[in-house]
Amino acid sequence: MSAPRFSGIPGEARTVLYERDFGRTAVKVLPGEFFVSDEDIVITTVLGSCVAACIWDRGAGVGGMNHFMLPGGEGGDRDADPVGLAGRYGVFAMEQLINELIKRGGRKANFEAKVFGGGQVLRNMTTINIGERNAQFVEQFLRAEGIRIGARDLLDVHPRRVAFFPTTGRALCKKLASADASLVAAEQQYNAKLAAARVGGDVELF
């Protein structure tokens, strides 16, 4: 049975478990994390307002997933450009994933993406639909980078469980009836951390 190989880089997911549904080792990606692999494992996550991009290179047999959101704001941020200041958080999350895929032998020209999440589950955050902004951002980013979106399951009000098989590009998405308290709490804490942090300088893709 394949075991995940870790790079030890900041932001890399470290939660390992056994997925009985799939009969293999899994790495669970939490908010703000990502994971890339060329092994016969499954990468999983549970999404509410966050989004996950699963990107795969068919030729190299390598794929990965991230899990992120743009920081929420007050009133005036409602119509903010999702690739502007706050969008740098999303750019950084996408940069981490893409750069690690390239390190593992992937080529951006061969990438295919599948994107999930952006549900409106943080109902108490009435000033801005974070899920909608996250979904808009990830689609805009991938278009700008010339990465084809092969599948998407975005928006709505449901949380989602996503399983991604990095060597084959197969992705499974299950909508959940409602967000449990732990998911909502985790996303609220993550959003609060982002909103309180200072946005760093520009990031570049190579």
Image (cartoon, rainbow, N blue to C red):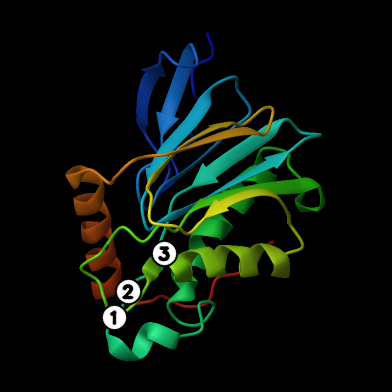
Residue 88 appears anywhere in the view: yes
Q: Which mark is residue 72?
A: 2
Q: Amino acid at mark 3?
A: Gly
Give the residue type that dot 1 points to: Thr
Residue where numbered disc 1 is placed: 127
Q: Establish if 133 lies above or below 188.
A: below
| Residue 171 placement, left or right of 206 | left
Rounded to the nearest whole Å, what is the CA distance between mark 1 and mark 3?
12 Å
Q: Quadrant of the C terminus?
A: bottom right
Question: Mark 2 and mark 1 in contact (Cβ < 8 Å)?
Answer: yes
Res. 129 image quadrant: bottom left
Discs 1/2, front = 1
Residue at left offset 47%, top offset 78%: 201
**Mark 3 sits on what residue?**
131
Between 189 and 9, the one nearer to me in the picture: 189
- Secondary structure under the numbered disc 2 in the rendered image: loop
Q: Is 136 left, or right, of 49 in this rendering?
A: right
